Amino acid sequence: MDMAPAAEPLVRITDVWKQRGRNTVLKGVNLEASRGQVVCLLGPSGAGKSTLLRCINALEACDRGIVFVDGVPIGVEQRGTAFYRMRETALSRQRAEIGMVFQNFNLFPHLSVLENIIDAPIRVRGESRAAAVARARELLARVGLAEKEAAFPRQLSGGQQQRIAIARALAMQPKLMLFDEPTSALDPHLVGEVLDVIKDLVASGMTMIIVTHEVQFAREVADVVAVMVDGVIAESGPPSQVLARPRDPRVQAFLARSLREDADEREP
């Protein structure tokens, strides 16, 4: 009986290295994300998690290795057996397929909420204003902020700004969503409203790679947890394995420290 070929992962990261000065930030990282999967990246500060995300959408160039999204190399083009950095116009077309939500919202302060959301679909994808506005309003309702379309970022809480940033990324109808510590800049009482929006995206089947320090959140939403330490993925697998029964001593130490910090934050 013939076996059906395994589906190509939506994201395939192969032997990615990244150097900054004398510091090697990424040291041969390999990672995959299947369509509809949620991958959570955990690890201590300085482990390389955010740099890896920036390499996935070519905000930073890999020194070695290649990132593939939907079978296409990101940020480079192949000529013969060699790969070369793409021109910025081609890079922009690729990035349009990959949504990115940063720690600090990155909204345009001089534009209203609605204009923030429709800017890229009109300018990059060439959508009509009417179509872009209709989708923006659907997304605003989805993130619970339909009444804020005329507001400016300075008039919103941090949690509201981050929800608008998520809506803005979704407006481009990306194949993949990347989240770089989406709750780290928020006051603790605003974290839940952003995590709820991300959980809604999980339920919808969106493929996501999420850098987070929220271990419990990763336990709830991730199909795969990957723990990075010192530029490498020390351990990856289902949350039930990696978070409950880690094998790598570095992962054990990181999770024990995270549990202590969580306990300290809960103390009055």
Image (cartoon, rainbow, N blue to C red):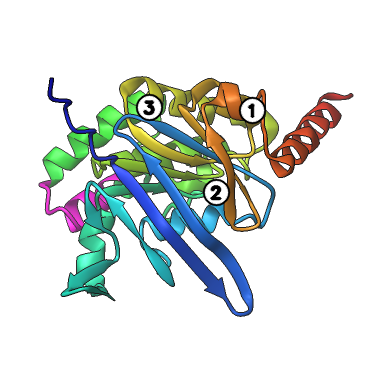
Q: Is residue 63 left or right of residue 172?
A: right
Q: Residues within 10 Å of mark 3 (few under 14, many from 20)?
A: some
Q: Quadrant of residue 263?
A: top right
Q: Is residue 88 left or right of residue 240?
A: left
Q: Nearer the viewer, residue 35 or 130?
A: 35
Q: Quadrant of residue 22?
A: bottom right
Q: Secondary structure at mark 3?
A: helix
Image quadrant in which the N terminus is located: top left
Q: Is residue 163 magenta?
A: no
Q: Is residue 49 above or below residue 78?
A: above
Residue 62 in view in this figure: no
- Alpha carbons under labels 3 and 1: distance apart: 22 Å
- The residue that mark 1 highlights is 243
Q: Residues within 10 Å of mark 2 (few under 14, many from 20)?
A: some
- Looking at the rendered structure, the kind of residue marked 3 is Leu
- Alpha carbons under labels 1 and 2: distance apart: 24 Å
Residue farthest toward the front in the current orientation of the protein: 1
Magenta stretch? 117-128
- The residue that mark 2 highlights is 103
- Looking at the rendered structure, the kind of residue marked 1 is Leu
Q: Secondary structure at mark 2?
A: loop
- The residue that mark 3 highlights is 201
x 63%, y 33%: residue:
214
Q: Nearer the viewer, mark 1 or mark 2?
A: 1
- Looking at the rendered structure, the kind of residue marked 2 is Gln
Q: Earlier in the sequence, mark 1 or mark 2?
A: 2
In the rendered image, residue 78, in percent from the top left (x then y), is placed at 20, 70
Q: Is residue 77 above or below residue 256?
A: below
Q: Is residue 5 left or right of residue 40?
A: left
